Structure formats: structure tokens, C-alpha cells
Image (spheres, coloured by chain):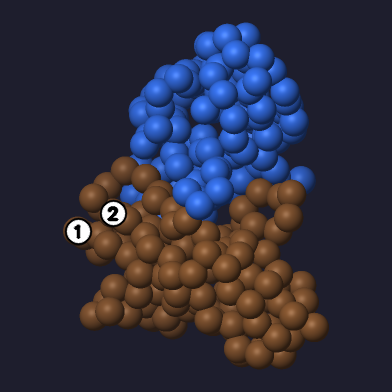
Amino acid sequence: EAQVTQNPRYLITVTGKKLTVTCSQNMNHEYMSWYRQDPGLGLRQIYYSMNVEVTDKGDVPEGYKVSRKEKRNFPLILESPSPNQTSLYFCASSGQGARLAGGGELFFGEGSRLTVL
Amino acid sequence: AQSVTQLGSHVSVSEGALVLLRCNYSSSVPPYLFWYVQYPNQGLQLLLKYTTGATLVKGINGFEAEFKKSETSFHLTKPSAHMSDAAEYFCAVSRSGGYQKVTFGTGTKLQVIP
């Protein structure tokens, strides 16, 4: 089954304790992206990746890191989480990246709800 | 720069009534436009999209949207609401001729009243 898998789905942590949210897709997609969803703000892009070893900042990258060492994985790293990073996080992928310049459908994971105390 | 405005964070309709969710966009180049739906505790899934061609786009579950360039709008409609349509709906824009950056609206929660 084609899917985007995120882990963990739920996490409560404390300020400053490094954490990683994993994202994996099995559709051989080139493009992957991380979003955070906050009430009244919709989805805001954190980072995206056009392909292996190619990543770039989205609209709200502060406090986050990413890496893309393999095509299928795109982990989101919070080096020193703070309470303002409490949010619902979504990973998404698309098979139509730079070549088709934006017309592709995004496939989303089920989300990771993070609480930073 | 591109942006999306969704009018109404909450919309309530009676079962069987028309659903109309409003979306206006801003883009300096011809846009690609999308509607995504998010059911409770799930990720987003694509309802429909406009890239080029016919301006009236049909999607899944009986939804459709019309791209109106003169009004910079991409409103989502469904003739008859069903209880299962209760969800949050997001309009999104990306731009043609460039890298794939998708900008989402703030979402509209649809409530369907029996």
C-alpha cells in the first residue's frame, strides 16, 4: 500500500530534549516536505527536499533541522525543543517535483502530535 | 509571492443543502490550485486540483470547484451535503514555472447538521 509513515504519532517531551520525528514514503517520490499545523494558521511549511541531499527552508524553519540521505526518508530534527514548537506535524511527499513545477498531488502522513513542556 | 484566503473558518450546513467553501488566491504567475480535505485524526488528502485546461474541476465525493481568473477565486461546492462531509477543508496554491512550494489557506471546518 502506498503510504507516508510518520513516527511517533504522539509525543510529550520537555524543553531542550532533542527529538527526531521520522518520515518514510514507499512511493519512490522525489519531493518531500514537513508542515506544522496550528489552529487558525493552517499548514505552514518548515522544510522541503527536492531530492536526495537537496533541502531548503520553508516558511518557518527556525528551530528545526532536516536531512535527506535516502530518497525514502526525511526526518525532522528538533535539536532543542521549546514550548512554541508544540504542534501537529505532517510529512508529505510528491512524485512531481522540479520537473513538473508544482502541479503534483501531495501525499500526507497521518501526523505527529508533539507537546513540549 | 503567493497566498490563499479562505473565508469563514467554520461553515455549517444542513444535510442535503448546498456546500460552498470560499477560496481566493494571490499569485504573480499562473497558479496551480488545490483543495484538500482532512478528516478527524487523519492527514490531508486531495479532493481536486486545477493546473491547466478546463476551469471547472470535478473531484472525489461529488465535490467540484471552478477556477475564475478574473475573480482570483477557486470556490469549492457540492450540491447536497452528506454527514460524511464533515471535515476540515484546505485550499492551496502552488505556482507553475517554478519549484514546488505549496501555500495552504487557514482551513474551513465544515459542520453538517442532520
Q: Are marks 1 and 2 on the same chain?
A: yes
Task: Give me the C-alpha separation between circle 1 and circle 2.
Answer: 7 Å
Asked whether residue A80 appears in the rendered view, the answer is yes
Q: Residues within 10 Å of mark 1 (few under 14, many from 20)?
A: few
* Closer to us: B16 or A22: B16
Write down the quadrant of residue B74 in the picture.
bottom left
State which quarter of the image contains the C terminus of chain A: top right
| Residue in the image at 51% along x and 39% along y | A35
Q: Position of residue B18 (x, y in %)?
A: 60, 89
The disc, 1 or 2, on the residue closer to the chain's N-terminal end is: 2
Left-right relation of A105 to A99: right
- B22 versus B37 height, above or below: below
Q: Which residue is mark 1?
A: B28
Q: Amino acid at mark 1?
A: Ser
> Residue lying furthest left in this view?
B28
Report x, y in % for residue B111: 68, 72
Give the colour in which the image draws chain A: blue
Q: Is residue B63 shown above or below A111?
A: below
Residue at 62% across / 53% down in the picture? B44
| Amino acid beneath label 2 | Gln
Q: Which mark is residue B2?
A: 2
Q: What subunit carries mark 2?
A: B
| The image quarter in which residue B15 lies | bottom right
Helix, strand or loop at mark 2: loop
The residue shown at (74%, 49%) is: B41
* Mark 2 neighbour class, 10 Å CA radius: few under 14, some 14 to 19, many 20 or more: some
Residue B102, image x, y percentages: 40, 49
Q: Are marks 1 and 2 in contact (CB under 8 Å)?
A: yes
Provide the letter of the chain coloured brown. B
